[in-house]
Amino acid sequence: MRLSVLDRSRVRAGHSHPEALRDTVTFAREAEQLGYHRFWVSEHHGVPGVAGSAPTVLAAAVAAATSRIRVGTGGVMLPNHQPLVVAEQFGVLESLFPGRIDMGLGRSVGFIEAVRKALGHDKDDAAEFGPRLAELLGYFTGDQPVRGYPADGLRVTPFVLATGAGAQVAAAHGVPLVIGAFRGEEAMIDAITTYRAQFRPSTWAADPYVVISSTVAVADTTEDAWRILVPEAWAMAYSRTRGEFPPLSAAEDILAEPMTTRERALFEQSLQGHVFGTPSEVEKALDALTERTGADEVLVTTSTHDRAAMLNSYRQLAALYH
């Protein structure tokens, strides 16, 4: 199975945003040594617990610190940016690190209204994702009236992150699809089926290519693997009740604190839909997931407070398939 990594530069309690970014670069070197295929970084704005706000800048640092692993974004949120600028940024990346750059693109807008206003966009801009994607790709193929140097003529593989109508957009443009397993399996499989049925071969891909994004936690015991998931699950519950996404706290601190009924419900909900357990349990679950979906690749995104536990999880996961 082809395995890749999506790291969101999560901030840990007691640590700073700059530390989180430096941890991402260090983690990329470790992921390369473990044999992961890609290392992607994400885009978030105005979120206290996430340091990754400029993915193309961070991707450049990651690519400079590594030598073989593919590097990309999961993703650049196209509604936030002018397509020409995005093309230029990826053209620079591909020029500096030829053959190693992936252009993962999403259609999400800012997390809250104040962030959207600061970015100069609103929720309705997500509806323009398809035309913006077409414009962006045109700068690489030379099909725009403005030449997008240095992107013009370069081949940077685009990926579409499926939210909303993302699967249909990816199919219409003939590009690989990235879809989260946390969407719910029925919805995910429906989207993949639609993508494959509507896929139109293009200069970017001759056949459909599906990447499943999933949180995966591996440890020596099922309980230890579950604890890896606790900090992120609590951060999600916290954001839903307080409107702010916090840095990651230690699992033992979270479990020792009382929760309201609503917090408990949201916390338990956030723990659903992930793959976790001992190596044999995870291997069985991932093999079953890829068999049901026909996925070509799994993009693993696992955040937790205990960095050593996170790295051990990725290490044990890599050992299963390499």
Image (spheres, rainbow, N blue to C red):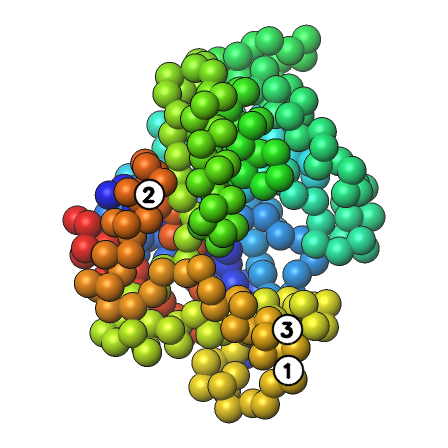
Residue occupying the point 72% across, 67% down: 243
Whether residue 66 is situated above or below residue 130 in the rendered picture? below
> Are the residues flagged by discs 3 and 2 in contact, CB closer than 8 Å?
no
Residue position marked by numbered label 1 in the rendering: 261
The label nearer to you, 3 versus 2, is 2
Residue occupying the point 58% across, 79% down: 264
For disc 3, the neighbor class at 10 Å (few under 14, some 14 to 19, many from 20) is: some
Specify the amino acid type for callout 3.
Answer: Tyr
For disc 1, the neighbor class at 10 Å (few under 14, some 14 to 19, many from 20) is: few
Asked if residue 3 can be seen in this view, the reply is yes
Residue position marked by numbered label 3 in the rendering: 238
Whether residue 313 is situated above or below residue 114 in the rendered picture? below
For disc 2, the neighbor class at 10 Å (few under 14, some 14 to 19, many from 20) is: few
User: How many callouts does the rendering have?
Assistant: 3
Residue position marked by numbered label 2 in the rendering: 292
Q: CA distance from mark 3 to mark 2?
A: 33 Å
Q: Position of residue 105 (x, y in %)?
A: 55, 36
Specify the amino acid type for callout 1.
Answer: Thr
Specify the amino acid type for callout 2.
Answer: Arg
Q: Position of residue 81 (x, y in %)?
A: 69, 35
Q: Mark number for residue 73?
A: none
Residue occupying the point 56% across, 10% down: 142
